[in-house]
């Protein structure tokens, strides 16, 4: 192989390895019909799960869903965490940008390198529109005031929830874990998956809610070669997604589990996944 060929091969390998945690840069454009103004999963969520609540979004990517939930459902606080510091940087930029668009006389931040991918701009446009000076929205907020600005209610943090060892004093009323379990499973095996479920249980207040969107077993096969670790873990997995309900109810201790997904209109083929509501 020539030197140029070796460099190209190395570049392809690096690009592949950079997404071993599912930390895609254009994730929202992969799974949402571009004709839609918002993620169709939001239509399945109830305001009562978020309004006035402390919330956590595990695997928040660029933070657009996190920010949209804060706007649409009026949560008291919401923290988005992701293993990729680059995505967290993008999420914080998105937050500042949208918050400035909402504030009277605010100006959008200028940057030489926009952190929102072009494929995600439809969702970002909807968020910006929803934060504009709309009379109907303003009257609703007068009836149900939100304490604090968007910047005060939404935050992002780079964190690997599996390898975090210190005990957290933070507690939440609602936790989202959307399309994350496969990547935990492939990178940390069955032990990592159980660790995730246990940590979520401990982070939830009594009566708290977990919104879980597990990827199907069929999708594991297409990603099992993203790394040597993933290939090895794939061959050793015993707890396939079809037994998650048994684990969460009988082993972890959730008292109920409900499938709320139905059919998600506008979801790109391959991303029409079940979404479950679990109650502690």
Image (cartoon, rainbow, N blue to C red):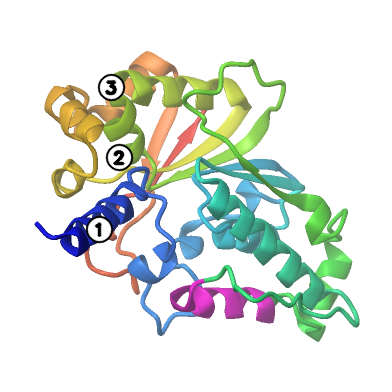
Disc 3: which residue: 190
Q: Nearer the viewer, mark 1 or mark 3?
A: 1
Mark 2 falls on what kind of element?
helix
- Indicate whether 192 appears above or below 148: above
Between residue 87 and residue 54, name the one nearer to us. 87
Q: Earlier in the sequence, mark 2 or mark 3?
A: 2
Q: Earlier in the sequence, mark 1 or mark 3?
A: 1
Q: Quadrant of residue 143?
A: bottom right
Residue count near mark 3 (Cα–Cα under 10 Å), binned few <14, some 14–19, many ≥20: some
The mark that comes first in sequence, 2 or 1, is 1
Q: Residue at x 50, y 53 (%)?
A: 61
Tag count in the figure? 3
Marker disc for residue 152 = none
**How far across and how far down the image is residue 40, in percent?**
43, 67
Mark 2 vs mark 1: in front: 1
Q: Disc 3 on helix, strand or loop?
A: helix
Q: Which numbered disc covers residue 7?
A: 1
Label 1 SS? helix
Q: Residue furthest front?
A: 3
Residue plotted at (33% across, 26% down): 188
Q: Position of residue 249 (x, y in %)?
A: 37, 22
Residue assigned mark 2: 182
Image quadrant where residue 181 sits = top left
Does the CB distance between marks 2 and 1 fall below 8 Å? no
Q: In this view, which residue lies farthest toward the left?
A: 1
- Image quarter (top left, top right, bottom left or bottom right) of the N terminus: bottom left
**How far is disc 2 from disc 3 in space, using C-alphas?**
10 Å
| Marks 2,3: beta carbons within 8 A | no
**Residue 178 on image: x %, y %:** 43, 47
| Cα separation between marks 2 and 1 | 31 Å
> What is the span of residues highlighted in magenta in the rendered image?
117-129
Observer-nearest of 195 and 276? 195
């Amino acid at each position: 192989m020539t030197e140029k060929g070796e460099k190209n091969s190395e570049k392809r390998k690096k690009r592949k390895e950079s997404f071993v945690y599912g930390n895609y840069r254009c994730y929202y454009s992969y799974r949402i019909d571009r004709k839609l103004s918002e993620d169709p999963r939001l239509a399945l969520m109830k305001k009562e799960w978020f309004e006035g609540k402390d919330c956590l979004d595990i695997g928040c990517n660029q933070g657009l869903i996190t920010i949209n939930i804060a706007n649409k459902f009026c949560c008291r606080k919401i923290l988005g965490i992701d293993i990729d510091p680059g995505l967290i940087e993008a999420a914080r930029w998105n937050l500042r940008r949208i918050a400035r668009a909402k504030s009277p006389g605010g100006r959008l931040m200028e940057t030489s390198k926009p952190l929102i991918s072009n494929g995600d701009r439809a969702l970002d446009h909807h968020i910006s529109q929803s934060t504009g000076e709309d009379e109907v929205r303003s009257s609703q907020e007068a009836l149900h005031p939100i304490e604090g600005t968007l910047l005060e209610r939404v935050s992002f943090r780079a964190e690997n929830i599996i390898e975090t060892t210190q005990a957290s004093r933070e507690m939440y009323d609602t936790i989202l874990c959307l399309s994350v379990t496969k990547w935990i499973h492939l990178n940390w095996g069955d032990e990592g998956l159980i660790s995730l479920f246990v940590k979520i249980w401990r982070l939830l207040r009594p009566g708290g809610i977990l919104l879980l969107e597990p990827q199907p077993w069929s999708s594991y096969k297409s990603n099992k070669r993203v790394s040597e670790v993933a290939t090895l873990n794939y061959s050793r997995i015993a707890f396939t997604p079809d037994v998650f309900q048994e684990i969460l109810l009988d082993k972890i201790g959730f008292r109920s589990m409900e499938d709320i997904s139905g059919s998600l209109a506008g979801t790109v083929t391959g991303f029409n996944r079940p979404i479950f509501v679990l109650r502690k």
